[in-house]
Image (cartoon, rainbow, N blue to C red):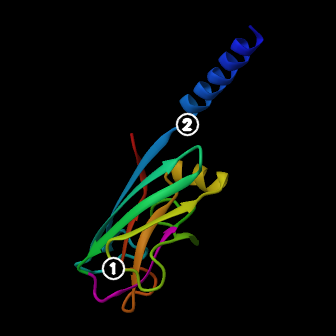
Amino acid sequence: MMRSALLAAVFAAGFITAASAATLQFHATMNGASEVPPKQTAGTGDAQATLDTTSKVLTYTVTFDGLSGPATAAHFHGPAAPGKNAGVAVPIGGKSPTSPAHGTATLTDAQIKDLEGGMWYVNVHTAANPGGEIRGQVTQIK
């Protein structure tokens, strides 16, 4: 009897934990007009990301094309509202990233709050545009 009650309690606790876990989806469309200040470029890009709220792991794919030259860096930045700049939150693809760039990062609680609040952006840098050639605000897909 005691064993059955213990197993039921363990099962219920596991079910509640699993039920409270969530996978959140995020997206950004990058272009030169979204850079601060805006850039004239044919470059475009896209970022897709998934956040596992239990493990706090962000998994992402960033694609870009049509840049003025090879990418010299790419990052998620934050916290920053659209039109504002911020420091690097998560580097993407190492030095001289290529498209598509895939990766994962374990986020802090503060980073998760900023990401969920729309306070992150992603951008890709080039030699001609060292501050960033294309940028897009990261938004949650609901």
Q: Quadrant of the N terminus?
A: top right
- Residue 97, given in percent of the width and then of the height, sits at 40, 80
Instruction: Tell me the kind of residue under disc 2.
Output: Ala
Q: Which sits in the foreground, 126 or 35?
A: 126
Residue in the picture at 51% in, 38% down: 22
Residue 45 on the magenta segment: no
Q: Which sits in the foreground, 40 or 46?
A: 46
> For the residues marked 1 and 2, what is the alpha-carbon distance in whole angstroms?
40 Å
Of the numbered discs in the image, which one, if any, rests on residue 21? Answer: 2
The relative height of residue 131 versus residue 48 in the rendered view (above or below) is below
Q: In the drawing, does residue 85 fall left or right of residue 14?
A: left
The boundaries of the magenta stretch are: 67-76
- Residue 58, given in percent of the width and then of the height, sits at 51, 56
- Residue 25, given in percent of the width and then of the height, sits at 41, 47
* Magenta segment main secondary structure: strand
Q: Earlier in the sequence, mark 1 or mark 2?
A: 2
Q: Quadrant of the C terminus?
A: top left
Residue 72 on the magenta segment: yes
| Observer able to see residue 133 | yes
Of the numbered discs in the image, which one, if any, rests on residue 39? Answer: 1
Instruction: Tell me the kind of residue under disc 1.
Output: Lys
